[in-house]
Each structure stands twice: as C-alpha cells, then as structure tokens.
Amino acid sequence: MNAVLDVKSLVRVFRAGGQEISVLREVSLSVAAKEFVAVMGQSGSGKSSLLHITAGLLPATAGQVFVDGREMTALDERARAEMRRHAIGYVFQNFNLMPQLTAIENVMLPMRINHQDPRKEEARVETLLRHMDLWARRDHSPHQLSGGELQRVSVARALVAEPPLILADEPTGNLATKAGQEVMNLLRSAVDEGGRSVLMVTHNPYDAAKADRVLFLKDGQIDPAWELGRGEVHASAVLDRLKELGI
Ligand SMILES: Nc1ncnc2c1ncn2[C@@H]1O[C@H](COP(=O)(O)OP(=O)(O)OP(=O)(O)O)[C@@H](O)[C@H]1O
Ligand SMILES: [Mg+2]
C-alpha cells in the first residue's frame, strides 16, 4: 500500500441537546505519497471533524483510518498520540498555539516533543520563519500576534518536523491574498520538494486549485463522481463543481 492516508467508511454521529446528527456518513478517501488533496464543503459539513478524526483527536463512530499503513483507529490513546507526533503535522482552524510560549518556541515544540535536538535544526527553522515572514516576530507570544501571523506560526509548526502527512484546516482562512499564496506555495513545495502528502480543507477555490485532486463533502458524503482528478483541477472547474453541488 503506498497511500500515506487511507480513510475507510468513516462515520461520525454527534449527540447534542437530545439530537443526533450524522456528520460523516461512510466517508472514504485516500492520499498517496507526494500527493496534495483538497476537500471543500459548506460550513458545518464536517470538514474539521474529518481532519480531527484522521489525526486521532476525535473518535470515529465507525470506520477506519490508516496513516502510513498503520490503523490509527485501532491504537490505544498512547500509541495514537505517538503516531500523531511522528507522522502528522496539523494546521488547526483555530491555530491551537501555546499561549505561554513565543512564536519560535511554538514552531519548535514538535521537535522538542520528538526529542530532536533543536540546535541541530536552527538553520532550517530560521529559513522557514524568514520564508514565512515571521523571523522578526519570533520572540513574540501569541497574544501579541495578528490573526495572519498566528496562522503562519501554526503552518510553520506543522511543517517543521517534516512529517509524512500534513493535515491543514483552512490554512489561509485568516490571510490576505499575498500571504495566503505564500502559505499555499509552502504547502505545495512541501509536497513537490519535500515529498510530503497534504490533506487540506479550504473554502477558497483558488487554493483548492493548487491541489492535485479536489474532493467535495456534501450531506456527509464524498462521492467519487464529484471529484476533480489529476489534470482536471483548475479554479474554473472548482467553481463550476461548487455551483453544481450547491456548495
Ligand atoms: N462536539 C460536537 N458536538 C456536537 N456537534 C458537533 C460537535 N462538533 C461539531 N459538531 C457539529 O458537526 C457539524 C460539523 O462540524 P465541523 O466543525 O466538522 O464543520 P466544518 O465543515 O469544519 O465547518 P466550518 O467550515 O464552519 O469550519 C456541525 O453541525 C457542528 O455543529
Ligand atoms: Mg471547520
């Protein structure tokens, strides 16, 4: 199996206020090595839930998730956390930075947790932060940073340990066009030059058009018939499909 990510018949039901909502109804998808896949869907369609479950941050109601050939959904909490640390870089929709750490400390946190020697990686971290226009802000804490800066710190943190799989939840959602393009270029080069795989959720058809394939989540399902495959991904095709599906 050369898929870095395989999601099989994933189901998630939420129970709230005496109601049950089936957010994901047998969702299946896979992301190959060195592949960039985008997922689009309306607000509330279950995109963040899908990424949370994929990373093992939220339990599935049913179904399986395989990362690098290992079944995440079958691991105990400890093994799952271990797997997440080594195999997955996560860009959270709400950033999830540690408020008591500075920008550079937040970026380097995955390395520390993985017991990598941060001194050995200093040059690489500096290049990454300069590239993301964060170097001048490296000693600021999150409350001193703008929304766009927080988002860039969050992207840098997901990339820094060079995990095989990057899950990105609206990584350009708080950025102006130019900064957003810079983040998209970084994700694209993480795939093309870094050999990583990316699963990205986005509302932006132009960002989705940077992916190799685009999937559409609607009514809890990702129908393969809706997919824009390799060679079919252009912003105009993405816009047409969104219109067709009423997304
Ligand atoms: N813990 C929870 N308990 C109950 N309902 C939840 C819970 N988490 C999410 N939901 C519901 O599940 C649905 C999907 O939420 P999710 O955050 O995955 O959507 P989304 O596609 O990421 O939306 P957005 O584009 O606004 O970020 C929503 O209707 C949400 O209210
Ligand atoms: Mg979301």
Image (cartoon, helix red, strand yellow):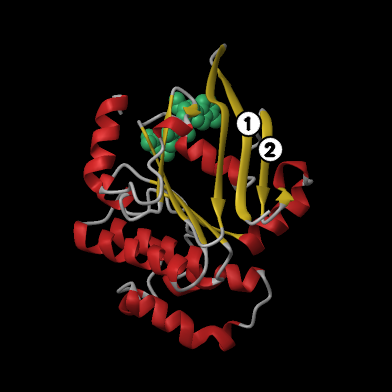
The answer to which of 79 and 227 lies nearer the viewer is 227
> Which label number is shown at residue 182?
none
The reply to whether callout 2 and callout 1 are in contact (CB within 8 Å) is: yes
Quadrant in the picture for the C terminus? top left
The answer to which of 227 and 63 lies nearer the viewer is 227
Residue 234 shows in the view: yes
Q: Secondary structure at mark 1?
A: strand
Q: Is residue 189 above or below residue 216?
A: below
Residue at point 50%, 63% (across, down): 158
Q: Is residue 230 above or below residue 89?
A: above
Q: 104 left or right of 241?
A: right
Q: Position of residue 14 (x, y in %)?
A: 57, 23
The answer to which of 178 and 238 lies nearer the viewer is 238
Q: Is residue 231 above or below residue 236?
A: below
Q: Which residue is mark 1?
A: 9
- What is the distance, in whole Å, between disc 2 and disc 1 at their CAs? 7 Å
Q: 34 left or right of 151?
A: right
Residue 146 shows in the view: no
Q: Which residue is mark 2?
A: 64
Q: Secondary structure at mark 2?
A: strand
Q: Position of residue 82 (x, y in %)?
A: 72, 59
Residue at point 51%, 71% (across, down): 160
Q: Is mark 1 within 8 Å of ligand 1?
A: no
Residue at point 54%, 84% (across, down): 121
Q: On the image, which quarter does residue 151 sit in?
A: bottom left
Crowding at mark 1 (Cα within 10 Å: few <14, some 14-19, many 20+): some
Q: On the image, which quarter does residue 193 sit in?
A: bottom left
Q: Residue furthest front?
A: 231
Crowding at mark 2 (Cα within 10 Å: few <14, some 14-19, many 20+): many
